């Protein structure tokens, strides 16, 4: 409203001046003034819109911006502010947050300190009718799926530079020079991306090379874990992740996302059967949520999955002892157990499994 009100005022000025003084040199000056007035009104409008957004809306915008630019610590902090604003988490927010937690090596320790959504909060949403800007599927090796979803986003929403940034990564993985040229055309029209991709474009035009020294390692990793799998629904998440882990047993990202999927869906049996894969990866301590899940599994079945050579954090040992005491007290009272965990251990997988799952009508 501020912008259009200001624009309406400014638009009248050059018309009156042109009528009073029809000299060409005189009428050109109001034209320049009009341009500067529009720029000024745009700046004012952006500032007003930023500061009039409520805290939750600003936090949501920051989550999107930081995650798109790979600023993972800031993404997590923005998610914390969003949670403190008491707004409901969406699958898209969960996906961005969980990716940030993984990149900061905190997914297995802090995932359930935030609200989580079992279906659509990890890999792909229940509705594909959104601009596809995330590169998580690409990083997992699902290049074909990532390319298809990005192309669908372009067809539905137009040439959004953020989506073309993902398409450029895919072009690098595929060695697709034609696709890269299309991306550069879009970047040239965008002020922000034009400068960011200027060096890549100059190198490509000079040498024909798509991959610079800074990108070599990341692209080589994606190529090494690439699998010809298609993901069209969040219901396929388990099957796809299990295939990725079986084909690339030393891929830490695929492993952690598979474990996260088991935890989100409460499939502790599959979790316990696959947890020993952790010994082939670079872990010093067993992540705390993993220990909590194994403790629940032990309380239900009496079976403990022994993981040799890895330590447990002293703090999580105390938490497990607290859970065991609460579980013994409320074993036959599911409602009381959920309430006690919400009171005593709200940031744990114990609470998620017993309280959150029961509150949403899911069986154990």
Image: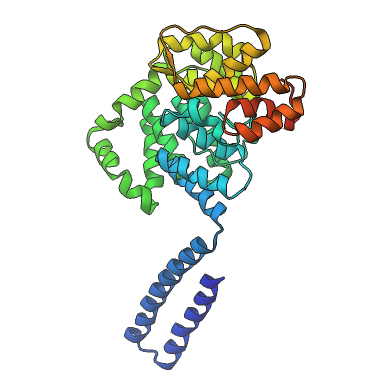
Q: Is residue 257 visible?
A: no
Taking the spot 47% from the left edge, 10% from the top edge, the residue there is 277
Q: Is residue 292 above or below residue 69?
A: above
Image position, residue 21 (x, y; %) = 39, 92
Q: Quadrant of residue 75?
A: top left
* Left or right: where 34 falls relative to 303: left
Quadrant for the C terminus in the image: top right
Image position, residue 125 (x, y; %) = 61, 33
Colour scheme of the rendered structure? rainbow
Taking the spot 61% from the left edge, 6% from the top edge, the residue there is 303
- The residue closer to the viewer here, 55 or 47, is 55
Q: Quadrant of residue 301?
A: top right
Quadrant for the N terminus in the image: bottom right
* Left or right: where 270 falls relative to 161: right
Image position, residue 351 (x, y; %) = 63, 29
Taking the spot 50% from the left edge, 17% from the top edge, the residue there is 228
Q: Residue furthest left?
A: 206
Taking the spot 41% from the left edge, 46% from the top edge, the residue there is 186
- The residue closer to the viewer here, 51 or 194, is 51
- The residue closer to the viewer here, 23 or 125, is 125
Q: Residue furthest bottom?
A: 20
Number of numbered discs? 0
Image position, residue 355 (x, y; %) = 69, 30
């Amino acid at each position: 409203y501020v912008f259009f009100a200001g624009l309406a005022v400014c638009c009248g000025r050059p018309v009156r001046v042109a009528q009073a003084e029809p000299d060409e040199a005189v009428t050109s000056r109001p034209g320049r003034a009009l341009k500067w007035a529009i720029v000024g009104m745009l700046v004012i409008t952006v500032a007003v819109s930023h500061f009039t957004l409520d805290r939750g809306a600003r936090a949501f915008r920051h989550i999107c911006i930081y995650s798109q630019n790979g600023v993972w610590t800031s993404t997590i902090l923005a998610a914390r502010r969003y949670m403190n604003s008491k707004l409901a988490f969406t699958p898209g927010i969960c996906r961005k947050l969980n990716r940030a937690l993984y990149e900061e090596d905190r997914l297995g320790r802090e995932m359930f300190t935030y609200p989580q959504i079992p279906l659509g909060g990890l890999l792909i949403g229940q509705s594909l009718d959104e601009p596809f800007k995330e590169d998580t599927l690409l990083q997992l090796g699902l290049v074909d799926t990532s390319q298809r979803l990005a192309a669908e986003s372009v067809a539905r929403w137009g040439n959004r530079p953020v989506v073309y940034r993902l398409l450029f990564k895919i072009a690098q993985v595929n060695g697709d020079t034609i696709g890269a040229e299309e991306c550069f055309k879009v970047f040239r029209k965008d002020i922000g991306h034009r400068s960011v991709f200027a060096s890549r474009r100059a190198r490509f035009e000079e040498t024909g090379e798509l991959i610079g020294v800074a990108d070599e390692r990341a692209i080589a990793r994606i190529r090494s874990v690439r699998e010809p799998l298609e993901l069209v629904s969040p219901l396929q998440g388990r099957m796809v992740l299990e295939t990725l882990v079986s084909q690339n047993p030393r891929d830490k990202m695929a492993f952690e996302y598979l474990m996260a999927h088991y935890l989100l869906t409460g499939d502790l049996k599959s979790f316990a059967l696959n947890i020993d894969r952790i010994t082939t990866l670079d872990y010093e301590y067993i992540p705390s949520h993993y220990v909590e899940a194994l403790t629940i599994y032990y309380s239900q079945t009496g079976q403990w999955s022994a993981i040799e050579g890895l330590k447990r954090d002293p703090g999580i040992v105390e938490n497990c002892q607290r859970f065991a005491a609460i579980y013994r007290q409320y074993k036959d009272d599911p409602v009381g157990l959920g309430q006690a965990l919400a009171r005593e251990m709200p940031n744990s997988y114990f609470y998620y499994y017993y309280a959150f799952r029961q509150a949403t009508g899911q069986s154990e």
